[in-house]
Amino acid sequence: MGRDAGPAGDLRLADLTKRFGVFTAVDDLSLTVPQGSFFALLGASGCGKTTTLRMIAGLEEPTGGRVLLGDRDITRLRPYKRPVNTVFQSYALFPHLDIAENVAFGLRRRGIRAVRDEVTRMLSLVQLDGYGPRRPAQLSGGQQQRVALARALINHPQVLLLDEPLGALDLKLRRQMQIELKRIQTEVGITFLHVTHDQEEAMWMADTVAVMNAGRVEQLGAPADIYEYPATPFVANFLGQSNLVEAEATGLDGDDLLVTAHGSRFAVPVGRARSRHGRVWLGVRPEKLQLVADPGRVPDGRNAFRAVLTDICYAGVSTEFLLRTGWGQELSVFTANADPDPRLVPGAEVTAHWHPRHSFVLPRGGEHD
Ligand code: ATP
């Protein structure tokens, strides 16, 4: 059981606010992290992720709002009384203690003496069987991070907070640890709240992602839903990349919304339009566009426009084509490197086309534009 053996439950932040002087770091944040889920708080540096975690851990006092765990209000509880543990990017292991004692630390502090079996179990959970007698300095960065994880999990917290835990690892190790963290979360079944600025990491690991911007949540949902149905231009460009074209919504045609952009008409399924009137953004992701040199080869029912190919950036698994449209906007197209058309060279006039269901419409003229 947790160190504070109450029933676990959803973690809820209600109107949580933190001001540092006149600066608002976390702005009236409300969200629910379902019990047992892997939840990612995703956002650029400085958007308030760490401050939010610190308020949940009790390391920072909120200016307003509440932190609730199940039906308990833990807003004013001292950090060590909360059934919450944090794993930081800096592993913060005790260099003079061996690995077993590092992992046992939380139990010893609570006066528990028979720790050996539990330490062995935790080291096995993080796949460090037999590492107990070593010192932290004898372990790699990835192994040290596993120890930090074991040290937090031995306390059986109801919520584990992870603050950029993989930030110090190189790309390959990071990938390995992402797989490990997911496995461990499934195995222990407790709520993981993971803070990261890495959109791929958030999408790949989490059941639910909350995209934060300037102290607020811009959008929250399953990774695929947020990617396919971004709610704001910020999200459309923070989670992946989007081509956003200024357009006007002109009316419905059956199940499609018609929009006009720079003299051309495009169709977008109504279900993919967050606004049906007036000024809008027409959005399409670079990987959803296809390029042809010959406009006669655009299949029926596709949206299309002409542009000049300005640059080609080869990246192995894919190539990025940069286009300049007739209205002077730069757009991007990603293609898998299957059969590159030799006519697609810088300076060529090309047609970019896409299926209407691969585009989306967002309101334009809001505060985030
Ligand atoms: P990063 O990914 O860089 O850690 P973050 O999203 O976690 O960023 P926070 O660390 O929560 O962001 O900081 C949010 C904002 O609050 C930042 O602009 C930061 O400068 C400011 N801030 C954080 N702590 C304090 C403090 N103790 N005093 C004043 N401003 C602070």
Image (cartoon, rainbow, N blue to C red):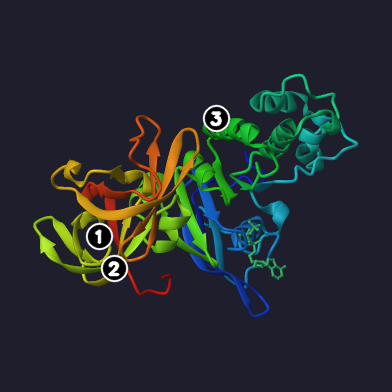
Residue type pointed to by label 3: Arg
| SS for dot 2 | strand
Percent x, y of residue 91: 75, 42
Pointer 3 residue Cβ closer than 8 Å to ligand 1: no
Q: Is residue 143 visible?
A: yes
Q: CA distance from mark 2 to mark 1?
A: 9 Å
Q: Residue at x 79, y 44 (%)?
A: 92
Which residue does the numbered mark 1 point to in the structure image? 273
Which residue does the numbered mark 2 point to in the structure image? 280
- Which quarter of the image is occupied by the N terminus? top right
The reply to whether dot 2 and dot 3 touch (C-beta < 8 Å) is no
Disc 3 packing (10 Å; few <14; some 14–19; many ≥20): some
Which residue does the numbered mark 3 point to in the structure image? 183
- The image quadrant where one finds ligand 1 is bottom right
Percent x, y of residue 145: 71, 36
Percent x, y of residue 164: 64, 47
Q: Residue at x 64, y 80 (%)?
A: 22
The reply to whether dot 2 and dot 1 touch (C-beta < 8 Å) is yes
Residue type pointed to by label 1: Ala
Residue type pointed to by label 2: Val
Q: CA distance from mark 2 to mark 3?
A: 42 Å
- Front residue of 304 and 368: 304
